[in-house]
Amino acid sequence: MDGLERKRHTRRKIELGGLIVKSGASDIPKAVILGALLDLSMPDPAGEQYSTFRKLGEAAFATRGPLSNPPGTKSDAGTSG
């Protein structure tokens, strides 16, 4: 792995860690996060679950900072946006 490839690899890891923080999952045990990610690692792109996750993710990226109540989740129900 050359220097540039190493930088890209490191950057990707930092970005992925940032997703955990942004989602508010940084206090969840690592084994639980990994298990959830493994469960989600093979979604059907045509499936409803994939579509729901994509919409939630796009809404989350549209906000700044960590999400205490990600848009569209049960904890967000009843709030106005």
Image (spheres, rainbow, N blue to C red):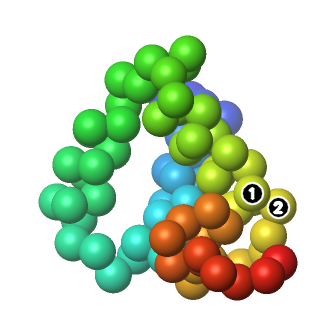
Give how far apart the Cα atoms at labels 2 and 1 are.
5 Å
Q: Amino acid at mark 1?
A: Ala
Q: Position of residue 74 (x, y in %)?
A: 49, 70
Question: Total number of numbered labels?
Answer: 2
Q: Position of residue 43 (x, y in %)?
A: 41, 25
Mark 1 residue element: helix
Considering only vertical position in the picture, is 44 above or below 36? above
In the displayed orientation, state which residue is furthest to the front.
78
Of the numbered discs in the image, which one, if any, rests on residue 59?
1
With 54 as the anchor, is 17 left or right in this view?
left
Q: Looking at the image, which residue is at 50% across and 22% down?
A: 47
With 31 as the anchor, is 11 left or right in this view?
right
Around disc 1, counting alpha carbons within 10 Å, would you say few (fewer than 14), some (14 to 19), or many (20 or more)? Answer: few
Considering only vertical position in the picture, is 56 above or below 18? above
Residue 62 sits in quarter: bottom right
Q: Position of residue 58 (x, y in %)?
A: 73, 49
Around disc 2, counting alpha carbons within 10 Å, would you say few (fewer than 14), some (14 to 19), or many (20 or more)? Answer: few
Q: Position of residue 13 (x, y in %)?
A: 50, 50
Q: Looking at the image, which residue is at 79% across and 82% down?
A: 80
Decide if residue 14 is in sight here: no
Mark 2 residue element: loop
Q: Looking at the image, which residue is at 41% across and 72% down?
A: 25
Of the numbered discs in the image, which one, if any, rests on residue 62?
2
